[in-house]
Image (tube, rainbow, N blue to C red):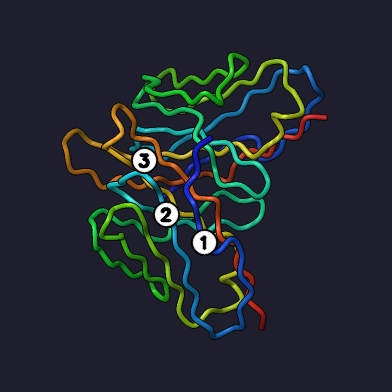
């Protein structure tokens, strides 16, 4: 199935460091969602973005809707051990006729070293 | 405030058997999605419902798969004659989407059903 490109695929960081990841697409999207998933659980919604250029924060998390509508970015500041997990982006496009499905990225696996 | 509920959490079955999963969405949500996730991958879209109408199906959804949402509330996903390649986490998500151009739709997931086909 179709998936969006996420970068990096995985990262090991020290506790207290900032983290940046991004998601890119060849298609234009009107909505971007960011999720965190723990092993054996479903994805948990972190941030939703609805407008090009929008910058939204949720605690230490900040996400941006890219100006081109083809990408989105997630930053985590001052990482802590419980930030470990897999982060997914998901995009929805009204420009693809007849569909409202969300397409997910390949995931960024984050490991935080105490 | 109850979230999306999926049952069972785990299912182990033998190849060739039929399995059925249930999803109870957040009560006021009119949209319900099914996704499949294999190890190391992001969720892949299978199908979605607007109320009781099934509006889109992925090519991943072979003729052995069928999904229903008979009264626009809970949904079931059935897999007939399971194959080892069906082993995956099956995720259900729900959202509310009203009519109109501008939508701020958020997708909320359940904990998933982990299927293992032996």
Residue pointed to by mark 2: A24
Residue pointed to by mark 3: B95
Kindly check if marks 1 and 2 are in contact, taking CB atoms under 8 A apart as contact: yes
Report x, y in % for residue A24: 42, 54
Report x, y in % for residue B93: 46, 40
**In this orientation, which residue lies closer to the viewer: A94 or B101?**
A94
Measured along the vertical axis of the image, is residue A33 above or below residue A85?
above
Q: Considering only order in the chain, which callout, 2 or 1, is on the residue closer to the N terminus?
A: 1
Residue pointed to by mark 1: A7
Q: Are marks 3 and 2 on the same chain?
A: no
Kindly check if marks 3 and 2 are in contact, taking CB atoms under 8 A apart as contact: no
Measured along the vertical axis of the image, is residue A56 above or below residue B104?
below
Distance (Cα) linking label 3 and label 2: 24 Å
Please, which chain is the residue tagged with disc 2 on? Answer: A
Q: Residues within 10 Å of mark 1 (few under 14, many from 20)?
A: some
Q: How many marks?
A: 3
């Amino acid at each position: 199935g179709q998936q969006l490109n996420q970068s990096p695929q995985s990262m090991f960081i020290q506790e207290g460091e900032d983290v940046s990841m991004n998601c890119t697409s060849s298609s234009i999207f009107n909505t971007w969602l960011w999720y965190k998933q723990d092993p054996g659980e479903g994805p948990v919604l972190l941030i939703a973005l609805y407008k090009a250029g929008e910058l939204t924060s949720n605690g230490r998390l900040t996400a941006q809707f890219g100006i081109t509508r083809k990408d989105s970015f997630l930053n985590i500041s001052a990482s802590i051990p419980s930030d470990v997990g897999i982060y997914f982006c998901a995009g929805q496009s009204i420009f693809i006729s007849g569909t409202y499905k969300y397409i997910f990225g390949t995931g960024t696996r984050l490991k935080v070293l105490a | 405030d109850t979230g999306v509920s999926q049952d069972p959490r785990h299912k182990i079955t033998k190849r060739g058997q039929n399995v059925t999963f249930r999803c109870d969405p957040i009560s006021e949500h009119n949209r319900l999605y099914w996704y499949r996730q294999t190890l190391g991958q992001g969720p892949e879209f299978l199908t979605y419902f607007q109320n009781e109408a099934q509006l889109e199906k992925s090519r991943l959804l072979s003729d052995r798969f069928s999904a229903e949402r008979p009264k626009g509330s809970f949904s079931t996903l059935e897999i007939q004659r399971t194959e080892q390649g069906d082993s995956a986490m099956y995720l259900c998500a729900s959202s509310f989407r009203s009519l109109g151009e501008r939508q701020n739709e958020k997708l909320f997931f359940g904990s998933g059903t982990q299927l293992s086909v032996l």
